[in-house]
Amino acid sequence: MTHQRTFKDRVRSRMAKTGESYTTARRQLLARAQATPTEPAAPAAPAHPTTPAAAAPAEPATPAEPTVPAAAPISAATGPAGASVPDQAGPAAAETATGPAEQTERISDALLSERTGRAWAQWFALLDEWGGTGRTHTEIARWLVTTHEVPGWWAQTVTVGYEQARGLRAPGQRRGGGFSANGSRTVAVPVRRLFDAFADDALRRRWLPEDVRVRTATAPKSFRADWTDGSSRILVGFAAAGESKSRVAVQHEKLADAEQAARLKAYWRERLAALKQLLESDGDPR
């Protein structure tokens, strides 16, 4: 445990000096450690003519650097595995998959620094210096990924937080001007069962009273549908979090204004809570 803390301290010290991301600084330190030559093993003593030669004791293995979990793949429904993402708030999926995150409740500096190597103020200053206020959402997110090796989901988190802090978008508003609402939940059922709760008409009506017109349903990954009056639509992503746990993220797009976005955000919080209760207490094994 002490060795791991020491290594992390070395990584963060290098980050402070070079401005590198946590991943880059760690890789550089590991590469330097691997390039350091080790002392050659002493030659074995000559064997006695009538006694088999004893094998020279092997050099002790160089202790491995402490294992630091790599950033896990992400999907339209979740952030990186292990990230402390609230069920009902915080960034949703990447903008290219299910629309922009609302991020009305910003995640903590401690978590952001742990996952990206910098706190909010540091990212804002870096983006200002780069000219972030004059860049598009896609340009900012791509720059964070390619230049600073920020994992995709966290790049979206930083991008949306920066845009809101600089007045480029209001909470719930897309960068282009439209509004959206989102919601997410982790449910203790297999991902296929969670997908069926949207795709199966009879099962969906047990927790979602609104009529929807299904556009696409790709099991068990995504579900898209037009809302009741056809003026808005929902994009839903699913991801497994083990054999008996999964996560769903809903993005409700093409909303008229901030008031409707706030109302639907509360609606989805309520409906996803009802979905969770239904599936976790239902004896239907599907």
Image: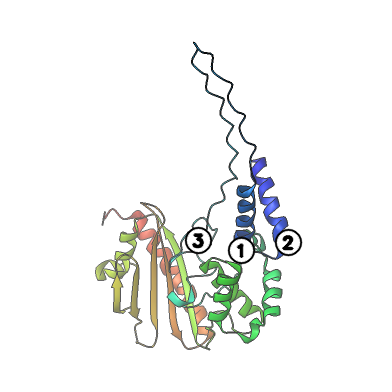
Q: Which residue is mark 3?
A: 80
SS type, badge 3 = loop
Label 3 or label 1, whichever comes before in sequence order: 3
Residue at which label 2 appears: 16
Q: Is residue 121 above or below residue 213?
A: above
Which circle's residue, 2 or 3, is located before the other in the chain? 2
Residue 272's disc is none
Tell me, yes or no, whether the two marked residues, 2 and 3, touch with CB atoms within 8 Å: no
- The Cα atoms of the two marked residues, 2 and 3, are separated by 24 Å
Q: Given the image, on which type of amino acid does mark 1 rest?
A: Thr
State the SS at label 1: helix
Residue placed most toward the observer, 246 or 128: 128
Q: CA distance from mark 2 to mark 1?
A: 13 Å
Mark 2 or 1 closer to N-term? 2
Residue sitting at x 32%, y 64%? 220
Residue for badge 1: 116
